[in-house]
Amino acid sequence: MSVLTIILVILGVGVILWLINSYIPMQRTIKGILNVVVIIILVIWLLKVFGVLDSMQNLRT
């Protein structure tokens, strides 16, 4: 996956979060929960893209 694709996805998620926080009327707590969930999903996706999660699955205790 190219760096440009990764940057575009991060920017897209940022714009979507900005639109949700600015223009969609919702309770503040629901917006906060939604922001946290989207950021966690983005971080997990980034870890998969960079192969960190794959290498962690190969670890044995």
Image: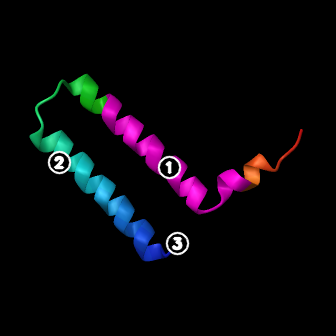
In the rendering, which numbered label is found on residue 2?
A: none
* Mark 2 or mark 1, earlier in chain: 2
The reply to whether the C-beta atoms of the residues labelled 1 and 3 are less than 8 Å apart is no
Q: Is residue 52 magenta?
A: yes
Q: Residue at x 65, y 60 (%)?
A: 51
Residue 26: give x, y in percent of width and height. 16, 28
Q: Amino acid at mark 3?
A: Met
Labels 3 and 2: the sequence-earlier one? 3
* Label 1 vs 3, first from the N-terminus: 3
| Residue position marked by numbered label 3 in the rendering | 1
Vertically, is 14 above or below 7? Answer: above
Picture coordinates of residue 19, whole percent (x, y): 17, 48
Q: Residues within 10 Å of mark 3 (few under 14, many from 20)?
A: few
Pointer 1 residue = 43
What kind of residue is marked 2? Leu
Q: Residue at x 19, y 40 (%)?
A: 21
